[in-house]
Amino acid sequence: MKLVHTSDWHLGARLHEEDRSMEHAAFLDWLAALLVEEHADVLLVAGDIFDVKAPSPQAQSLYYGFLARAVKEHLCRKVVAIAGNHDSCKLLAAPSNLLGELGISVVASAAGDLSREVVVVDGDDSRPALAVAAVPFMYDAELANFGARETAADASREEKVRAGWCAHSSAAIAAARSAAPGAPVVAAAHCTILDAEPSDAESERCRRVGGIEAYDPSPLAAADYVALGHLHVPQQVRGGAGRMFYSGSPLCMSFDEARFGKSVNVVTFGGPGEIPKVEKRAVPAFVPVLTLCDTPDVAKAKLAELVAADRAKRRFVRIQLKDFEGESRGHWTDLRAIAADSGTLILEENDVRPVMRETSGLRAFAGRGIRQLKPRDVAERKLRDSVRNFSESEIASYMAMFAEAAGGVE
């Protein structure tokens, strides 16, 4: 049996308000082609299908359109998906009966009936060839309830949550093993595992699951392969005996994420007890996410070269200026002019020079008494010190709004 493991699609996500539906559509096209090329039996999506709990119609159209294509084009035998912390359990669960009839299993919430979290995939001989223990994202109240039976009455809430996660994960894997004796078992989970490498706080907005920062991987060790979601860095979990992996997000969810490649895992199962063969398949960068960090003159030259290479090509760029003297505003004007009317979009502008402590922020008002400070002076200083490098016209506009909101406060 062959399984493709992916996660953290975050359909509907934006990068600094830039629409990314074209990138997501391109990824789903690429994924469909990969399933066919690999002759995959199972596609497993380990949570965070959507970016928000109330996804846009466009994001939902991408999701359901892909599922329809998976059925119509026979991309694989089975699609299995679990809910992540960004997903709405109710939204994912609503069509589950219909999708189930089409060979698509969506596990949106944990249940007392573990059979609802077990998906069995038959082989060519119609016998169970693979079982998935599909454990979705669980909130702390659920986990504490699961753990109440495993801990003493005076146990802390954290102890109950940890015990609940361990007990439920172990029980789901055992149920999958019982449902398909002799077949490989895959555990799917959406959580942070101890010692796993996170991405950055901007893209992974909430790493805690059930109020716990990270979980011990040992309860998952009973599975033959562990398909993890939640963290965006593709990685093998240390201490996972070569069986635990995060596939990572297929798109860069921030500029910092561009430091590592994006991929999905192709997992091939051998005989009983064998460690599966895990191969990464690199996801193309459908829209490059780039950072130019240099002096103003060098940054301008690099940006001009980038734009000249293919003026129409869509790119997302962060520019960080360093090692120069004087004001940065003129440089930002020049850089914006270079990228104007091209597919290169400057989404972040950062002056990364060390801050002059004596003149930055409220230190600029050193020596002035509190009665001498005026709200408008503090507001304007905040705007001028912002890493967003507001233009003079933007500062004037914001100050006019501030004056209106302040209502004459002096």
Image: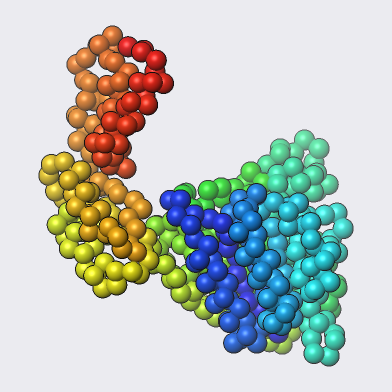
Camera sees residue 36: yes
Question: Horizontally, is 120 left or right of 376 in the view?
Answer: right
Q: Where is residue 355 in the image (x, y as percent from the top left)?
A: 23, 38
The residue lying furthest to the top in this view is: 371
Front residue (pair 156, 116): 116
- Considering only vertical position in the picture, is 377 above or below 191? above
x and y, in percent, of residue 36 in the image: 62, 85
Instruction: Name which quarter of the figure residue 126 lies in.
Output: bottom right
State which quarter of the image contains the N terminus. Answer: bottom right
Look at 79% across and 86% down and name the residue there: 123
In the image: residue 362, left or right of residue 407: left
In the rendered structure, the answer to whether residue 338 lies left or right of residue 155 reads left
Q: Quadrant of the C terminus?
A: top left
Residue situated furthest bottom in the rendering: 125
- Nearest the viewer among 169 and 132 is 132
Picture residue at 74% right of the left edge, 47% below the top: 143
Q: Where is residue 353 in the image (x, y as percent from the top left)?
A: 21, 45
Q: Is residue 264 left or right of residue 292?
A: right
